[in-house]
Amino acid sequence: MVSDYENACPKPIEIHFPALGNEPWHPFYINHYISSSYFKSDIEKNQITFVSPILWFDPFENVFYDESLKIGDKNVDIRCICATYDYVDGEESAWRRGDDDKNNKTIRVSLNFGKACEMLEKLGSSNECDFYISIVDYSQSKDNLIKKNAPHYKSVADYIKVMSFKRKAFAYENELRIFAVSDKFKQQEVHSFALSHDDYISMIEKVTLPPLKPFKRKDADFKKYNKIQDDKNLDLKKELLKLLPKDKINQSRLYMK
């Protein structure tokens, strides 16, 4: 069954900002999983943060990354935000679960795709930076990635395609990557772009609090799961309510009846 999103945005989706062409403006979400402490820091400072691929945990994902790459006469370096582009079976199960530190829980920030595109266009114009959106290519095996020689890139778009390779084992994630491309990152592993508070808030559709690890049926607290989960996330919810409207915050129902 083909989802509405796939009908609207046939794969592969490749969007370059600025100089937009036939971009798909529509109200679908993209979902960014992020540490609550990082998210709170960004929204308090009215900034959005992109990270270097050298910080990615999977060593096969950044095998072609080069911090000093030159394409034509242009020095190219990239920073990235990883998101998912559709709700699929298993998406929430990939969430880091358990008794995380109360200040470092992983939350899901759902962004309006159309408004995110508008934000990237503004940031590109004001920061001498190009932005690309690409859906991850899950066609590669681990052996393929190890054996591939570094390609010859005719354009930045070619480089983005290679940096969108991921192993077949992760195809359930439906990952989408937003790349910031510039020669001004100066080897910094993270780069934050300032944006207006109104733009940031309007871009956020909802923030979802993380699920609590489920209890076994024989556990004495089995029937109290819903309340215990709400209590565990209460402090985090209060902190987020200081930054976001109430209707933008909800609780994951992964293990709730």
Image (cartoon, grey):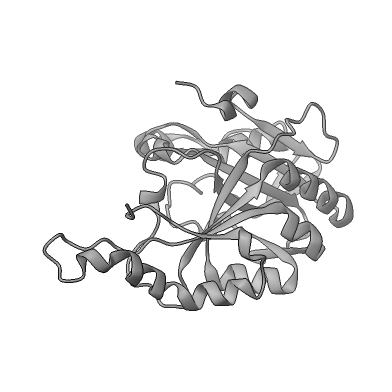
> Image point 79% across, 65% down: which residue?
197
Q: Is residue 102 left or right of residue 153?
A: left
Q: How far across and how far down the image is residue 40, in percent?
A: 62, 72
Q: Is residue 136 left or right of residue 155?
A: left
Q: Nearer the viewer, residue 145 or 38?
A: 38
How many badges with numbers are in the image?
0
Q: Where is 131 relative to 21, above or below?
A: below
Depth check: give the residue in front, 21 or 87: 87
The residue depicted at 37 percent of the width and 34 percent of the height is 141
Q: Position of residue 77 (x, y in %)?
A: 69, 52
Q: Which residue is situated farthest in the left direction here?
A: 218
Quadrant for the N terminus, please.
top left
Please determine whether, in this image, residue 66 is positioned above or below residue 85.
Answer: below
The vertical placement of 38 against 70, above or below, is: below
Q: Position of residue 196 (x, y in %)?
A: 82, 63
Is residue 239 in view from this perspective?
yes
Question: Which residue is found at the position 15% from the left and 59% from the top?
Answer: 217
- Residue 187, how many percent across, how many down? 67, 64
Is residue 187 in view? no
Q: Quadrant of residue 51?
A: bottom right
The foreground one among 155 and 139 is 139
